Amino acid sequence: MGEMEESGMDSRSGAKIAPCGTPDLRVQIGSLALRNPVMTASGTFGYAREFENLVDLDQLGGIIVKGISLQPKPGNPPPRIVETACGMLNAIGLENVGVDRFITGKMSYLRKLSAPVVVNILGDSVEEYSEIARRLDGVEGIAALEVNISCPNVKKGGVAFGTVPAMAARVTEAVRQSTTLPLIVKLSPNVTDIVVMARAVADAGADAVSLINTLIGMAIDPISRRPRLANVIGGLSGPAIKPVALRMVWQVAQAVSLPVIGIGGITTANDALEFLLAGASAVQIGTANFYDPSSAENIVQGLTSYLQEQGEDRLVDIIGTLKTGTD
Amino acid sequence: MSEFQQKCSILSRDCLAPDVFRLTLQAPRIAAVAQPGQFVMVRVIEGLDPLLRRPFSIHRSFTNGSISLLFKVIGKGTEMLARRCVGDELDVVGPLGNGFEFSDERPVCLIGGGMGIAPLLFLAEQLLRTGRATGKDHVLLGARNKDELAPFAEQFSALGYAVQLATDDGSIGHKGFIPDLLDFVLSTVDQVYTCGPHLMMENIVRQCQQAEVRCQVSLETHMACGMGACLGCTVNGKRGLVHVCKQGPVFNADQLEWSL
């Protein structure tokens, strides 16, 4: 056992790196430069400190923290999660400490990390989104904002911002005017045509889009005849949604000129490569952080190995190189 | 506090009763720092279904670097875990959570129901090891029948605890529930530690409150991460929701909302 651990550590510290040099994993998301394309997705990595004993945070391309609202949110009543085939449903209800306590309580740790920190923001009105962005603007140590538009618009009867192009555009514009930071808009897959949504936020000033957020789903306990989530419905994530996410990333990458960040069930380097080949400039690791905290680090290593095996010097050269048809 | 992700060889696998298993794992880094009441998250297979790790209390921790887990087959995850063999490796994260608080209030009473017995053996051994056992400490154990209870009764007795048993069918000890036995014991102890079915713990908490005896409870919930990231394992606390994985799994009973 001890020996096996040792050899495992050796491969991580570089013993397997080929003499010809390490491939260049750097990617660019608008003005945001990442040392590698592997980020951790919002809501699956806490405020990073939760993972400091298990993950070498210096290996990550970027860290996207738990979504922040203007006021603290207690979240939904339990039960909040249920496992499904190759996935899980969650209805956490966006529990978070609120923007002010985030700045005073979480940023001092986060700004010391070498990985760029992206703050995910959410609101129930356009004004709330811009107010959060204003409060975060100028806070040292924040590399970019990611706007979660899957939240219900309370003033419009609870319709999710991310399902109506005009509403998604208004949120994007409002945040754009409130911050100088690079702006990533995280798209909901629960729409008829995600390309329409991507175009709407691109035209409204987004610097990049990330997709997909969770797919709305449900599970029922036949014995009690009750839904397994107190909230009845929740968001499906994990490997179960990967094919859907990949299809959407491919469609959006072809349709818009903005950088695309792929999210959805990524567990291995091969999963990440599928998204990169489909046109994503970077990826986010989500649910895998729960069942395998080492997955993000392992994916970084796996991408390096892939590029070496393929004789590629730079990761950017493989982005969007999917071969279709007869080419 | 420090936790690790380790590949752990299965050193032994014992079927203690129908559907009840004990696995002993080589987990030196976890065993070195584990405290009674803490838990580990185990990946039962390497595949993606079931996807999530399963939480298990640490049942025993040994100075030779191994830990034991105790579980009953109740679903797909535990069924797959029960099929793993000696020599297989399991991916384990831990130790996680806060663990029981050792107080100066003693003698104590340890109360376990069903698989809730698991963390209490570790606690009983640690009380002895650290010189906290008084010789007047009690252990009350309950389960469905003799098969599920007898193996543990002997272990606690061997440590010098006064053990009383309750079974649903009366095949060993008192026929009925643990709370039936508790009233006689409560007047002689200053601290109760309990883990087991929620209804059992609710009754015990009520009795402890009436007798003004401090009570620590170890809770079980569904968890995705075990590390305070997913925020999925909430329960109702007196002052809002609390997270079982990070703020627990052990709580002082008066921190929580009880329906009784």
Image: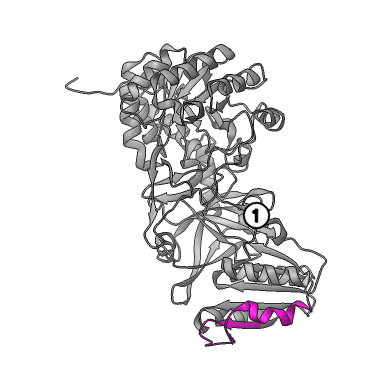
Q: Nearer the viewer, residue A170 or B245?
A: A170
**Residue B212 at x, y percent in the picture:** 78, 69
**Residue B54 at x, y percent in the picture:** 49, 56
* Location of residue B159 (image quadrant): bottom right
- For the C terminus of chain A, the quadrant is top left
Does dot 1 land on a helix, a strand or a loop? loop
Q: Nearer the viewer, residue A12 or A87?
A: A87
Identify whether A22 is placed above or below B238. Answer: above
Decide if residue A122 is in sight here.
no
Give the residue at mark 1.
B248
Identify whether B115 is placed above or below A287. Answer: below
**Residue B188 at x, y percent in the picture:** 79, 79
Amino acid at dot 1: Gly
- Write down the chain letter for disc 1: B
Q: Is residue B179 magenta?
A: yes
Identify whether B200 is placed above or below A255. Answer: below
Q: Residue at x 71, y 33 (%)?
A: A105
User: Taking A165 as reference, is B171 left or right?
Assistant: right
Q: Residue at x 52, y 24 (%)?
A: A146
Q: Residue at x 44, y 67 (%)?
A: B73
Colouring scheme applied when the structure was drawn: one colour
User: Taking B172 as reference, is A110 left or right?
Assistant: right
**Residue A54 at x, y percent in the picture:** 58, 43
Q: How many marks?
A: 1
Q: Is residue B75 magenta?
A: no
Q: Residue furthest left?
A: A326
Q: Residues within 10 Å of mark 1 (few under 14, many from 20)?
A: many
The residues colored magenta run B164-188
Decide if residue A191 is in sight here.
yes
